[in-house]
Amino acid sequence: MNRDFFAILRSFGLGLALITAPGFGGGFAQAEPTHGIAMYGEPALPPDFVSLPYANPDAPKGGRLVMGENGSFDSLHPFIVKGRAPTGISLFTTETLLGRSFDEPFSLYGILAESVETDSARTYVEFTLREAARFSDGSPVTVEDVLWSFEALGTLGNPRYAPVYQAVAKAEKTGDRKVKFTFGAENRELPLLLGMRPVLQKAQWEGRDFSATTMVPPIGSGPYVVDRVEAGRFVSYKKNPDWWGKDLPFYRGQHNLDEVRVEYFGNPDVHFEAFKSGELNSYRETNPEKWATHYTLPAIASGAVVKSEIPHQRPSGMDGFAFNTRKPIFADWRVREALILVFNFELINQTINGGAVPRITSYYSNSELAGDVANPAQGKVLALLEPYKAELLPGALEGYALPVSDGKAANRGNLRKASALLDEAGWTVQDGVRKDAAGKPLAFEILLVNGADGYIAAANIYIQALKQLGVDAKLTTVDQAQYTERTNVYDFDMTQLIVALSLSPGTEQLRYWGSANGAAPGSRNFAGVNAPVVDALVQTQLSSTDRADFVTAVQALDRVLTSGRYVVPLWYQNIGRIAHAKQLHFPEKLPIYGDWPGFQPEVWWYQE
């Protein structure tokens, strides 16, 4: 199971001067430009910081990283729905106004912007661009580039950009290097989200259709440029020797490699063989059983290749098989609960992973945000949920825990419970087939991507178990292009859902679970979640001014989603596993997010 590691962040800056601006509640609030901004409280790093705490400012420069991805790509335009862009093109070639430190829940520091300012209510944000900021062709990064980029992304780009841009009531140039955005909605995260939008070169897109795919790489201001590329095969990013940002404190110890090359493979086995043969010098392993048994390589025995394990403190997120609740067969929570009961996690985990990884029991497992979803809601969490008591599913208030099997293939206890729930929901066994009152069989398709071996193996075991209840499930695998096309319009019954969640979830939650995105094409709301309580709890998160209140709102949302039975949860990786050439190194100090965006290749270096 591969993860995409792109769309990332950076940071540093300075500033002075006082200004006044109206707040949503009336009156005026003092504000001044600062070098960074945090979602709650103040950024941990001072204005004169030397480097990010998990970067090595003395790291040597040079060398190359060659890694692989499963799948393919047919476009170099990562900012739209159409096409599939290669890993890293936005990360390596473009930059944002602010950048993220992955050693804090959610703090940003200036990159293209030397300072950021906002008022206490965060009704606006104003950025001052660095005078030295340049695109890779040497032209300056201007306010006009920022304004055009945000409009193009928000109106023509991937739908994930639209909600933030729609919240902007006014966008204006306020100085030669100053740009200001005034918001028409109350959302304290908006200044940070705008700070993380990629800034593109307006001139490159004049006379061109921004919404169309292209194999012309974007002209950005980032550390790398696209050097060589072969559609569907590989892309090579070369360090720009004239990169304007190489001396920024935020970047000290980052982007140390001369080349980052990404090879693409249609088959995961071929991908791994390429690493074994030395064609790749880094390989991220997501299967712990394979990590334990398949790495008896001569190169490892000789020390030429190192196995590194990277712990982390980030939430598990959600990884599993999502029910498309837009489909009538999955509209009843009892059906979804029955099908969750049939999924024999203990057997599947042992078969695929050697039982070495924990199950996702909450959307925020492995973090303080998870709360205690298995037990009754209490205190402030209960207070947030009680107004929606009538619409909540069983377990939201009382507590909900995933079923546990004895690990045997028969799974008799859970199958009996599942059968009773299906009977109650009107799906009874007729001539060995589970049917409704009209005689329609309970049948559905599981849509997966070719090469997703772990998911495919889990689905096949699941399908055999479903047959015991008279449920007819079939597995369909398609290439990445077909998968993207179908999931963009929700043309599936059940499919894999991978949602990575941070320690500071915010506006993106509306894209994952918001009712407004349930029907919009291209959203990540695969399950079709459509619940007022979900929308309300996300808004509570976004308006919270205190970290404790924010955590309470997230824990309440977690209970609603978990008890909603929208997904058959699989497992999460509580450590990252990377096998790599001994010449590739990373700092001893690890970020709290571990092996996530911002780690490899950003803070790695090559040294003989």
Image (cartoon, grey):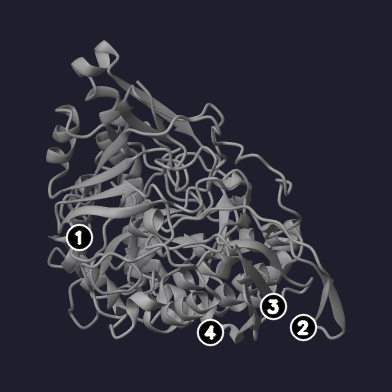
Q: In the rendered image, which residue does mark 2 sit on?
A: 24
Which of 116 and 537 lies nearest the eye of the viewer?
A: 116
Q: Upstream in the sequence, badge 4 or badge 3?
A: 3
Which of 271 and 245 lies nearest the eye of the viewer?
A: 245
Q: Which mark is residue 367?
A: none
Q: Upstream in the sequence, badge 2 or badge 1?
A: 2
Q: In the rendered image, which residue does mark 3 sit on?
A: 124
**Badge 1 vs badge 4, beta-carbon distance below 8 Å:** no
Q: Position of residue 437 (x, y in %)?
A: 24, 80
Q: Amino acid at mark 2?
A: Phe
Q: Position of residue 395 (x, y in %)?
A: 55, 61
Secondary structure beneath dot 4 equals helix
Q: In percent of the image, x 34 and y 24: which residue is there? A: 583
Q: In the rendered image, which residue does mark 1 sit on?
A: 73
As drawn, which residue projects farthest toward the top?
A: 302
Secondary structure beneath dot 1 equals loop
Q: In the rendered image, which residue does mark 4 sit on?
A: 166
Distance, label 2 to label 1, CA atoms, is 45 Å
For discs 4 and 3, the disc positioned in front in the rendered view: 3
Q: Amino acid at mark 3?
A: Tyr
Q: Position of residue 289 (x, y in %)?
A: 29, 30
Q: Amino acid at mark 4?
A: Gln
Label 4 crowd (10 A; few <14 / some 14-19 / many >=20) = some
